[in-house]
Image: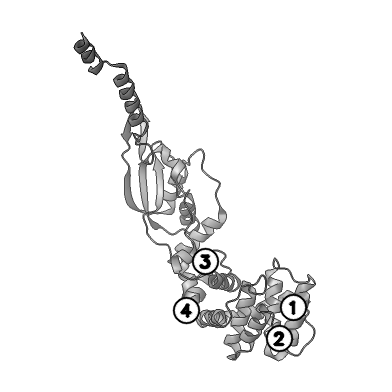
Amino acid sequence: MPNQRRQRRSSTSHPRFLRETKQSNTKSAAVTPRPFGRGFHRGGGTWNQMKMNTQTQHITPAQAKLYLSKPHPRQRPLMKSRVVHFARLIKTGQFHYTHQGIAIDTDGNLIDGQHRLHAIIETGTPATIQVSTGVSNHAWHAIDIGAKRRIGDISGIPGRESEVYRLALNLTCHITNPTAEEIIEVSNSQFGEAVKILLQHCGTARKILSSAPMKAMAAAWFCETGDMYSLSQYRALVNVNLEDMSHQIKVFQQQLLTGRIHSSNRIDLLCRAYLIFDNSRKNEKKLMIHNISDFTPKIRDMIRRYMHSTMVSNRACMI
């Protein structure tokens, strides 16, 4: 009798064995991943992978209009600045063929690439782009949600340096969203070399004093005169070294302390920087800007003289 009881307890029908087995099955089911994500959809109670087809197409303006005729119902609003950016790349030959392009979902809706297509129509110039059709409807939730690659990530140029080149391109060529190639082009120019020397001469960062307009004019005057006056005055101003400051720099600092100079007014700051880094004005005790339009053409011409005339001047400035 005792042996029979031991056999019953050791069988698989024992309550403790059943309880442990049930818990084990529950845990294994909880950690089993489900193949849901890009390229998958649920249909008929099972998970099936979509068949997506990607081809290289030379898209004409007429084809671009055809793709744009059926946008996704939740397509984001068109950003004119992005269209202008892509149009400028197409016009200047900087539009590169990559894996990114046009995406059409299984319902025939355009879910990615509207800005490129509008740029093709605006320029009237065909472009070679990857076109993916049969894209899963769930891909809509995964497109353009990652971090945007910054200029510094592509060019390797630090932000404190590239911001000067951005300002120079905006001022001389009216480019608000420059490419990495354009930034590198300016970096390799005489103006770019002057900016690098300036930052080596004084790498201290200080609000307004080390802003892009201040660095741009200090570097431009260094190119113009070839002496160290603008660089030394920039360092004295940023480091608040009163003994080395000229009368003009001291007047500028006083205007800054009294609130007459604001960082938001970049053109006014640029004009004042043009005056204070001018060696011929170092002994003047007044710093007044009556009309910024009297100075902006001079500043534009000065910076443009020391920027390369290959890509930046001949192509980008024609847009």
Outermost residue on the front side: it is 2
- Please report whichever mark, 3 or 4, sits nearer to the chain's N-terminal start: 3
Q: Is label 2 in a helix, a strand or a loop? A: loop
What residue is shown with label 4? 188
- Please report whichever mark, 1 or 4, sits nearer to the chain's N-terminal start: 4
Answer whether labels 2 and 4 touch (C-beta < 8 Å): no
Q: Is label 3 in a helix, a strand or a loop? A: loop
In screen coordinates, is 101 left or right of 214? Answer: left
What residue is shown with label 2? 245
Front residue of 87 and 202: 202
Q: Is label 1 in a helix, a strand or a loop? A: helix
Q: Amino acid at mark 3?
A: Pro
How far is disc 1 from disc 4 in space, using C-alphas? 32 Å
Q: Nearer the viewer, mark 3 or mark 4?
A: 4
- Residue 157 lies, in percent from the top left, at 48, 71
- Residue 146 lies, in percent from the top left, at 47, 51
- Residue 55 in view, yes or no: yes
What residue is shown with label 3? 178
Answer whether labels 2 and 1 touch (C-beta < 8 Å): yes
